[in-house]
């Protein structure tokens, strides 16, 4: 069983590596947007290819461990949770690409407005990705819960972004296509935050058997 | 092992039941939108609560079977695939609720335009949900592949919807908030179709070991 423990550690290590790539892809997608940086955009596409590769590898690895070691309840739960977290991370990579595609299109056009809340949303989303994985590694319940709180902040910022953009669109109809791009970028960031929240919920479930999915438990906001 | 086979059948039966609820939730969300039908909207919310319940049950059931029977490679793959498909279906339920929330808000306002392409997208999405699950039950490869083709059609309709709505927004700025709602409804339908595509890809993988995720294989369009 020593070997099995080492394999589980290796699996967790790969999941962290994947999360590192995802965090960086999110960051670079917003660099591409804010600084109109084509190189950063290419970097996201390159990272996403690696993320997809890792997605397949981690799935394969976790399924192999399930088959090979026929683990008991606790480790079984960890392995099925890894398969789900892996899916969430992979999807975040896709969302970073969506942001990048909109950023590339916006680079060709004059700016609608200086971007403040969108980079703030992205900063929060990156921290959420880091924290939900840190919470997994350290089995840190307050850290996992902090991710749920950040998710509410991201939602508030998203609402503010939408409201402001609607005003721009109504005042100057030429901004409409660009404002829609920004709106979808904010939507993608919100979705990234949702996936980080899914992971944090899985971590809480793993640690305490607390099922916070589907609001089965009332969220404690601080 | 007879008992295990029966359990697998039961698991598949529950997944189909969940898919039936999802299909119906999608349908009712568009009824709510097109016919301004509050009762249909309530029906979606009610169905989503049942979908969430089934999501937890199916996850629990599949994990228990993994732990209890320690199945061999093929059944192991089926069980991990069910866990993923279950996640996709659950997410579709959320997306149907998103559509419904926008429909409820649009009910308070005059119509922007007669809706044609959005109901068409929804019709396709419903068929995709049915077909990807039918493909699983019947181990029907062409049917699974047909879902991938429908996904491309949904994407094309989504592009047409966006284009038309931008024109409306530019011509009459008072329509902007409502047009944005419709845009996000089209986006939600496109996402539902993506999740059905994920399931179809999992079915293909289960049947033939063909990995069509991440475009590992070139899609055959007919």
Image (cartoon, coloured by chain):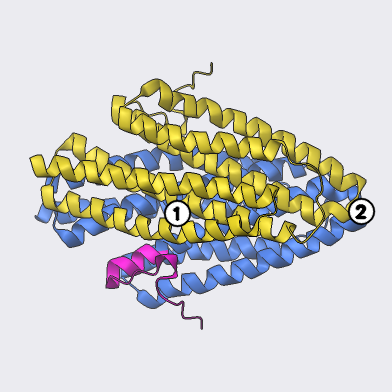
Chain colours: A yellow, B blue
- Residue at horizontal 35%, vertical 65%? B203
Looking at the picture, how far across and down is residue A34, in whole percent?
Answer: 69, 47
Say if A99 sits above or below A204 in the image: below
Mark 1 → mark 2, Cα distance in angstroms? 40 Å
Q: Is residue B213 visible?
A: yes
Looking at the picture, how far across and down is residue A59, in whole percent?
Answer: 30, 54
Select label 1 or label 2 by which is in front: 2
From the image, tell me which residue sits under label 2: B172
Q: Is residue A53 magenta?
A: no
Quick check: A65 left or right of B206? Answer: left
- Residue at horizontal 34%, vertical 45%? A15
Q: Label 2: how many residues lie within 10 Å, few (<14), some (14-19) or many (20+)? A: few
Q: Label 1: how many residues lie within 10 Å, few (<14), some (14-19) or many (20+)? A: some
Quick check: B112 left or right of B221? Answer: right
Tag 2's secondary structure?
Answer: loop
Looking at the picture, how far across and down is residue B101, in whole percent?
Answer: 66, 41
Tag 1's secondary structure?
Answer: helix
Q: What chain does mark 2 sit on?
A: B
Magenta stretch, residue numbers: B200-222
Q: Quadrant of residue A115?
A: top right
Looking at the picture, how far across and down is residue B69, in whole percent?
Answer: 12, 48
Q: What chain does mark 1 sit on?
A: B
């Amino acid at each position: 069983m020593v070997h099995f423990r080492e394999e589980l550690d290796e699996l967790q290590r790969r999941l962290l590596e994947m999360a590192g790539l995802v965090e960086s892809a999110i960051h670079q997608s917003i660099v591409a947007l804010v600084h109109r940086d084509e190189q950063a955009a290419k970097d996201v596409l390159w990272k996403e290819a690696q993320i997809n590769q890792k997605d397949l590898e981690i799935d394969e690895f976790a399924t192999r461990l399930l088959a090979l070691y026929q683990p008991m309840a606790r480790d079984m739960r960890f392995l099925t949770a890894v398969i789900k977290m892996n899916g969430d991370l992979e999807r975040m990579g896709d969302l970073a690409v969506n942001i990048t595609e909109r950023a590339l299109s916006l680079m060709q056009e004059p700016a609608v407005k200086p971007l403040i809340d969108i980079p703030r949303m992205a900063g929060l989303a990156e921290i959420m990705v880091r924290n939900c994985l840190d919470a997994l590694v350290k089995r840190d319940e307050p850290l996992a819960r902090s991710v749920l709180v950040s998710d509410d902040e991201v939602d508030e910022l998203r609402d503010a972004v939408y409201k402001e953009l609607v005003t721009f669109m109504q005042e100057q109809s030429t901004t409409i296509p660009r404002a829609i791009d920004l709106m979808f970028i904010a939507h993608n960031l919100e979705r990234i935050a949702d996936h980080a929240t899914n992971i944090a919920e899985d971590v809480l479930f793993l640690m305490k058997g607390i099922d916070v999915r589907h609001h089965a438990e009332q969220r404690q906001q601080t």
